[in-house]
Amino acid sequence: MNKKGLMKIFYVLSKIVILCVAVFVIYFVATRVYDYSYKLMSKTPSDDIVIRTVDIEIPKGTTTKQIANILHKNGLINNTYYFLLHSKLSKQDSKFQYGKYTLNTGMTEEEIAKILVTQGAKRETIKITIPEGYTIQQIAKKLAKENVCKESDFMDAVNNAVYDYKFIDQIPDRNIKLQGYLFPSTYEIYKDATAKDIVSILLNQFDKVFEDKYYERAEELGKTVDEIITIAAIIEREVRVDSEREKVSSVIYNRLDLPMKLQMCSTVMYALDKPRSRLLYADLEIESKYNTYLYPGLPIGPIANPGKRSIEAALYPEDTDYLYFSLRNPETGEHEFNVSLNAHNKVKGKYQKEF
């Protein structure tokens, strides 16, 4: 091959090398620009981020653009364009699965996309039942016993995470602030749900149950939501017979109106933080703002997590003059209600002799 031919080959090869370098540089710059702009526009996880659980459903046949709009509408992503671009570049957009999802606003776009790809309709779930009247501490122990999550993780999620529900703004600062608001029910949750997910799911259910009309009714009664839930929690722990809930509620309101100490054994039990079949007189002197034998008015917060019937009873007490109630039947949990202390003591003495 002559010199002219060699020069031509060298020229072509140099052009190819320059083109390859140019393509590499463009790709390198483009990916860096994309990474920077994506991080700028996407959510940045933070330890103090406000967490809100969101239930969404992706119907079968939904496009990636429609999925992005669903996520954006529910406050789960900041920008649909960058979610679409990320999905395209990561080759996930054709792999999103239909189904029902429980997501939360603390997740990044990458975490959400991964869940949509891997956990859709096939995601494994488990059922958990939170009994009415359980404390948060009892819920934590139950979840740990059933291998749902660690007790310490659950308590950490209760005490240290921030959740975005309007009723939380009305809760005063106190130990275990969310006591009373983890709604008791049976839930189907994803098997890999975190402790924060579970707490948010229970709070979300409370938010659904405590309707706007309940807020209005609380205002009519001159009570805060927290005071209503505190009353409801006492009702939950004192009552086993549904038909008595409104009567016990009336006793609480009547005593508050006098004013008269509530003297509810359930509040002392909570203050003691130990299971007891019966209180001792010495127990009634325990120093605690939850001790309604010692302090007038309502305790400083709920003593349990009440169900809907007890919440409704706290909002709509029966119109009575009752100030006292005594256990009449320990097997059924039935009570006898009285207006006077004299009548109450007679009834109390009679049934104590019987059992």
Image: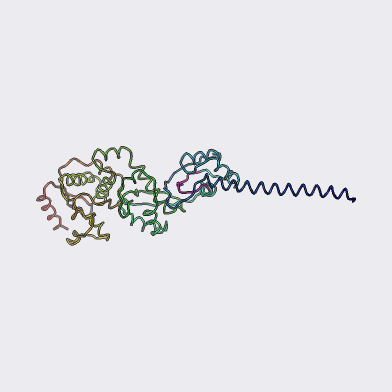
- Depth check: 42 or 51 in front? 42
With 68 as the anchor, is 157 left or right in this view?
Answer: left
Q: Is residue 308 rendered magenta in the image?
A: no
| Quarter assignment of residue 213 | top left
Structure colour scheme = rainbow
Which residues lie in the magenta part? 99-109
Residue 132: % across, % down: 31, 50
Asked whether 189 or 109 is in front, the reply is 109
Please provide percent x and percent y for residue 9.
83, 49
The x, y position of residue 116, in whole percent, is 52, 46
Find residue 289 and report its image quarter: bottom left
- Identified at 42% across, 57% down, the residue is 149
Q: Position of residue 277 (x, y in %)?
A: 23, 60
Closest to the observer: 71 or 192? 71
Q: Which residue lies furthest to the left in this view?
A: 342
Left or right: 244 as drawn, with respect to 87: left
173 relative position to 14: left or right = left
Q: Residue at x 72, y 48 (%)?
A: 20
Tally of numbered tags: 0
Q: Tell me the quadrant of the picture where the C terminus can be found.
A: bottom left
Q: Relative to 36, is 227 on the left or the right?
A: left
What is the residue that sits farthest to the right in this orientation?
2
